[in-house]
Amino acid sequence: MALRHRTNAEGAWFVDTRCIDCGTCREIDPNTFGVAGGQSVVTHQPDGDDLGAWLAAQACPTSSIGTVDHRPRPGRLYPREVEPDTGVFDVGYCAESSFGASAWFVTRPEGNLLVDSPRFTEALAGPFAEMGGVAHVLLTHRDDVADAGRWAERFGARVWIHTDDARAAPYATDLLAGAAGEPTAIAPGVVAHPVPGHTKGSVAFVVDERFCFSGDSLAWSLEQDDLTAFRGACWYSWPEQTRSLRAFAGASRFEWLLPGHGGRAHRPAGEMSRRLEALVERMATTP
């Protein structure tokens, strides 16, 4: 309570000043959380149903979300399927070392996938084991490896990362070496697309031409209701990111966009393609 940020809306829910402004809570429950003074705060108290707030609290990498009345947390909330019968799960439990990036679990007959890494916790290890374990850990880039090594060790999984970001995961078993426009098949229906720009070794993983796990290379802007890329968080090369996303637009097809940071979205594949092509044109005119 002593750390409660002073700009939280009056009521039970609050964010405290340990918040690192990763934006995860705003992506999970934009109706409850907003930003003020360089961190997330509660802008509107939940109206009756506070499931979104609980999901944000359990995902928060710094455990900064709480309630004044210390109400008991509901049962296990993660892994949480993004939509029934997709087999794709938001795993919550974001890691502070990954600046709160989201990670994803995908069930597949040929072997389950963990895309990027949450913090290691038995609260996820148990459900992962019940669903068949993890065969592949797919790392989109160097920033979001978190506890990937521990997950791989626990389940005997192969770990994939691009060679240009490989220093972040010295335990990786498989290095991707392609350039933009040179996809690599990892397993049936699972394709790695190099998208250098955010980092030199950034990769987007597309599963079954439905799900795109884009790391920090591509996201959905809730404010603009459109695809976006992060010009202010481009650590390698904005021109290269523009070129690589142009190549990605021509080589990929997906309906779901599930990033590490930024909004998530589900749109028809044709619409996603048109929006991605339009984004690349906008990026080309941005210094």
Image: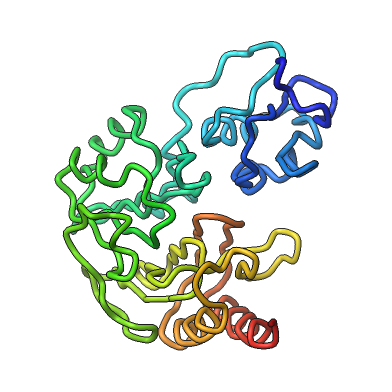
Give the image quarter of residue 221.
Answer: bottom right
In which quadrant will I find the C terminus? bottom right
Give the image quarter of residue 251.
Answer: bottom left
**Residue 93 coordinates in the image, percent (x, y):** 45, 36
Q: Is residue 126 above or below residue 219?
A: above
**Residue 219 coordinates in the image, percent (x, y):** 58, 64
Give the image quarter of residue 200.
Answer: bottom left
In which quadrant will I find the N terminus? top right
Answer left or right for 246 relative to 142: right
The residue drawn where x is 72% and y is 26% is 14
Answer left or right for 37 relative to 128: right
Q: Is residue 41 above or below residue 259?
A: above
The residue drawn where x is 39% and y is 62% is 140
**Residue 12 coordinates in the image, percent (x, y):** 75, 19
Nearest to the observer: residue 104 or residue 188: 104
The residue drawn where x is 62% and y is 79% is 275
